[in-house]
Image: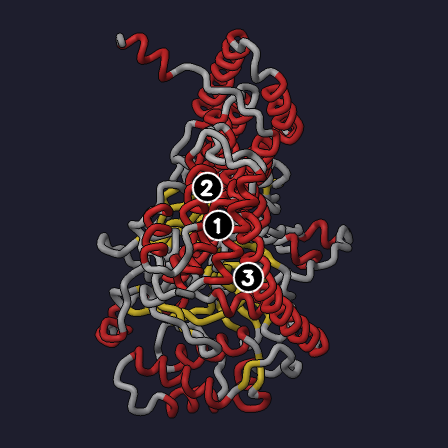
Amino acid sequence: MSIVGKLKQVNAPGRPEESIAFRVAVLASVVAGEVAVLREGVGTPLLWLACVVGTPLAFFMSHRTRHADRFWLKVGIAAALFVALARFAGMASSLEAASIADVQIPLAELFLWVQLLHGLDVPARRDLMFSLSSSVTLVIVAGVLSVDISYAIYLSAWGVAALASLVLAHRSELGELRPLVPKGTAQLSAATRRQLRSLIGVGALVIVLGAGLFMVLPPAGGARTLTFPHRVPRSSSAVTNPGGLSNPSLGDADPSISERDRAAGRLGRGAASYGYFGFSDSLDTSVRGRPDNTLVMRVRASQPDFWRGQTFDVWDGREWKLAEVTSRPLSRDLPIDLGVELFGNRRAAGDPTFVQTFFIERPGPNVIFGAYQPRQLYVDSAAYQLEDGTIRAGVNFQSGAVYTVVSQRPSVTEELLRRADVQLESLSQEFRDRYLQLPEVPERVRKLATSATVGAATEYDKVLALEKWIAENTRYSLDPPELSRGEDAVEQFLFEDKVGFCEQIGSSLVVMLRSIGIPSRLVVGFAAGERNPFTGLFEVRGSDAHAWAEVYFPGVGWQGFDPTAEVPLAGDAGISSAGSGVLRYLDAHLPSPPMWAVGFVAAAAAAMSALFGGAVFWRSIASRRRSERERSWAEVCLARIERIGNAGGRPRRPSETTREYGAILRRANLVGFEILDVVDTVDSDVFGDEPADPATRARAEGALDALERTAGRP
């Protein structure tokens, strides 16, 4: 055969697929994958309509025209694909993309259009299998874009449809083969059941292996990544004062509200339940309200950390403020290189990078959060930076906003911190004025800081000693006593109330450290939040808003300390596997059933176990009887002959034919001469041109009856 002939043979259209069930199962898997992608913000309402309505119509038309000539249809599909590709190229070029993330949404849209157009031309089984394979890519794309666990719904729907497609494809293929036994017989049904059990077994094995790998494989999202997502919804409004702080979640306490508007009484906005008063120009430690458990953002990162927002450095005994609020605009070119912090920042080429992507769920401050020390930023808005390293966006983030921060995490150990002891004379006067600033500190606060650090040789050991004292002598509470008017907040917390939340605790640590000459500051942001093992994202809630202390170590930079929690040194925290914390997460989020429900489930399980055992026992008996009923007439006769031989002590050997075995039984005087006629009839029934007629069968059965009665007699 020539090369052209071989090519024609390879590209010849396959036999049209007649199985409607198979076609519907593939359609279900494709639509599940399409919807999984669409719900991640991909596409316009037109694309939604095209996929949800157009894909079923396309599959329907493919089935109706599966026997027709499809030349012009293929030409039209090719032209439409060219238009879709040209549209994608135009969108990609207009984006001036800086990373793969910039084109991932247009690329996902292109793939959806390709999948839709392909649905118009799926007449044969191989075309349908290609669509099924394409649906795998769809669910993978959806998984990459997904940031919440609802993706599991679409993944489960796709998994069921895909498994059904494989089973039905196999059955359809078997249906084209020449049957070895007449259609409708039990042998074909049993084979089908065995194939179905095999497929189910493979599916179960895949699930078990997948769960096992999920529990042991390292988590996704390493320190280095190819994509740096960033997206600001069109509904996001610009900040009134560029470079200034804005926090609409605080309502009337929003720092962006001008003094003119306040004087004119243009207020009346209530604070959101998740709003945190620390994301403002000042932080009053007497404020007792705390944010609720509303989900405010999700963070994709390879390990937990404190998501820093901003710092405070001026303390008046009750309230924290910023010494300097002037910000400088940053470049709009991506990635945005963040300037070196004026005081205490450290840059080392060998420090590992740490990538975090923030998915905003609730409108909040225009603060850019990130782990210390942020080096690069990907955000679709203007950005500004303060002297302390705080970063602010030029817009008020709305739900759906996404930005990525690339931090450089210094590898810090206890030995390194002990060697990095502070020498005040080596620090500039401006640095000391800012980070050792204190009002008139109550004497007993100063004495406590001195006595608690007796015997601590290094700055690091002094920090640990004060952390230990606070942890052992005070108690964390979300409902502390009110701060008396005119009282020093730190003194009242340490000696009177001994109960408070992170603002009082962190402030006390900073004040005591400053009182013994250790530069420190208060930081506000969010704790890491709860890691969802199914999405790999940290779910950060309003209640995770937090304040902690940062201490300066020469040559190292700022290091966080928090007496309310165990804070790992930078570089020490980690996640062992993708499934880390899955049991804890399920225990926290699955509702606890009432005791009566537990008892009912236990009783139902016992009853089901008994029924299952009985069903298995009855099925084994029924199966044995059915197998006897389903055997051919010749097989039944042969079994009777073998029972006669077994009774006489001469079982049949595997190599012996029916006639040979009958002759052996006769020579051994175990049966009469009638056995020869019986085995001849059996052989004729099996190997003859026609089965034995009923009369011949009846004579053979009568002879067997007589042989069974006289078996073993001489």
Quarter holding residue 285: bottom right
Which of the pair 476/580 is nearer the observer? 580
- State if disc 2 and disc 1 touch (CB < 8 Å): yes
Count residues near mark 3 (Cα–Cα under 10 Å), then give few for <14, some for 14-19, many for 20+: few
Element class at badge 3: helix
Where residue 387 sits in the image (x, y, percent)? 41, 55
Which of the pair 244/399 is nearer the observer? 399
Residue pointed to by mark 2: 681
Q: Count the marks: how many?
A: 3
Using the image, tell me which numbered label, if any, was put on residue 637. 1
Between the C-alphas of marks 1 and 2, the distance is 10 Å
Quarter holding residue 302: bottom left
- At 67% from the left and 53% from the top, the residue drawn is 259
Question: Which of marks 3 and 2 precedes in the sequence?
Answer: 3
Q: Amino acid at mark 2?
A: Thr
Using the image, tell me which numbered label, if any, was put on residue 620. 3
Which of the pair 538/517 is nearer the observer? 538
Where residue 703 sits in the image (x, y, percent)? 51, 51
Question: Which of marks 2 and 1 precedes in the sequence?
Answer: 1
Q: Amino acid at mark 3?
A: Ser
